Image: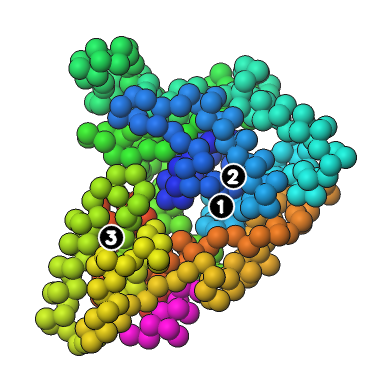
Amino acid sequence: MWYAPHSGFSNQLSEFKNAILMAGILNRTLIVPPILDHHAVALGSCPKFRVSDPNEIRVSVWEHVVELMQGGRYISIAEIIDISSLVSSSLVRVIDLRDFVSIWCGISLDLACLNDSKLQSSVSKSLKQCGSLLAGLHGNDDKCIHAINEDCRTTVWTYKQGGQEDGMLDSFQPDDQLKKKKKISYVRKRRDVFRTLGPGSQVESASLLAFGSLFSAPYKGSELYVDIHESPQDQRLQTLMEKIKFLPFVPEIMGAGKEFRNTTIRAPFLCAQLRLLDGQFKNHQNATFHGLRQKLEALRHKGTLPIHVFIMTDLPRDNWTSTYLSDLISDAHNYKVYFLKDDTELVREAATKLMAAGYGQRFITNSDNTVGKKYRSNPKLPDVLLYVEQTVCSCASLGLVGTAGSTIAENIELMRKYGSSYCQS
């Protein structure tokens, strides 16, 4: 089973969790994708019923996968997120996308092959054919591939023993104003994923099940696309659901965050996660700074000075001038400010250790000697700054000031809730 991740890292992580869940329910091996560049592929808006078609988004993801390989920037999400406990306990079976493509399409995604000028023409043609196949552009084949073309405009996936909700209308539907304005006629139905796509269904014989987006979020009393939160009658799936609530970063990243706390900050500190540039957030900079100012003022009146503050933000360091961040740095009596950069030695060391660990290669079960080979090392170190920053913030003993509506802040809150024991060790 594969799917088409998109948007920023936090959304991709949310989809990865849903993909693990779907693979567990359907008893399929999950094809693990790479981490895509921020917003290289966009879905659109489920609440507005304006999203890319599943075929379209699958093609876009495949084209970006090839781009990442050719640029030496491919890194599997399983090299960043630690799923070793899920695999070792047989809660889910996985295979790296590179190995799957090698098996299915007979194409090596090795960097050397992709950039070999003598092979480029034939490889490019083969890659395009493979992408078309994986996207389901040639239609469904009972023995080969079943591409799922239902998306959040028409479907909410559920899972209940007995399939009681299968075919029922979902509580969230397009309102009359939207129907008239956009001239749409979508009807959202709740579909039981096991009945529709699992063993005994019409698509059981398809070797590959291809989803589009698997992004979901609570909305108006329902879920946008996946509404599966418990399975009390199936202990294995219930265990899987509990485990994927929090998937930690791999040890190399967790260790870097902890090291920064222990050797650089060395004191109780506050984390400020400030999203100031992207999308809707750039219009709410004043409100974001106001929340931080209020928290720091409260700490200043009841705590020991200076207050240690770790800043993670998408606002470049050169642009801090004339902002509240510049004021904090200037007020050395009351505040001591810390931040990380891409070229910070600790961040670069974490990236180097990550590449040496090769987490994406350790989940191979296929005995074919063409599978599971070490891929040629990427000439560029992966960008791990965001992940290390989140780990630092998860250990902030004075609390977290997160940006309202930011999925990054939500992920840090999860880390603080479920992974706090790591910070205490």
- What sort of colour scheme is used for the picture? rainbow
Q: Position of residue 264 (x, y in %)?
A: 43, 83
Instruction: State whether residue 82 appears in this view.
Output: no
Which residue lies at the image location 83% right of the left edge and 32% below the top edge?
A: 122
Horizontally, residue 165 falls left or right of residue 385, namely left
* Amino acid type, label 2: Pro
User: Residue tagged by mark 1?
Assistant: 77
Q: Is residue 139 above or below residue 67?
A: above
Question: Which residue ends up furthest to the front in the rendered image?
Answer: 322
Q: Is residue 195 above or below residue 370?
A: above
Magenta part of the chain: 256-269
Question: Which residue ends up furthest to the right in the rendered image?
Answer: 118
Which residue lies at the image location 20% right of the left edge and 17% below the top edge?
A: 177
- The secondary structure that most of the magenta stretch takes on is helix
Badge 2 crowding class, 10 Å Cα cut-off, few under 14, some 14 to 19, many 20 or more, is: many
Q: Is residue 7 above or below residue 149?
A: below
In magenta segment, residue 268: yes
- Which quadrant of the rendered structure holds the C terminus? bottom left
The answer for how far apart the CA atoms under marks 1 and 3 are is 24 Å
User: Residue tagged by mark 3?
Assistant: 402
Instruction: State whether residue 304 appears in this view.
Output: yes
Between residues 31 and 179, which one lies in front from this camera angle?
179
* Amino acid type, label 3: Gly
Answer with the quarter of the image where residue 46 lies.
top left
Q: Are marks 1 and 2 in contact (CB under 8 Å)?
A: yes
The answer for how far apart the CA atoms under marks 3 and 2 are is 28 Å
Horizontally, residue 152 falls left or right of residue 298, namely right
* Amino acid type, label 1: Ile
User: Residue tagged by mark 2?
Assistant: 33
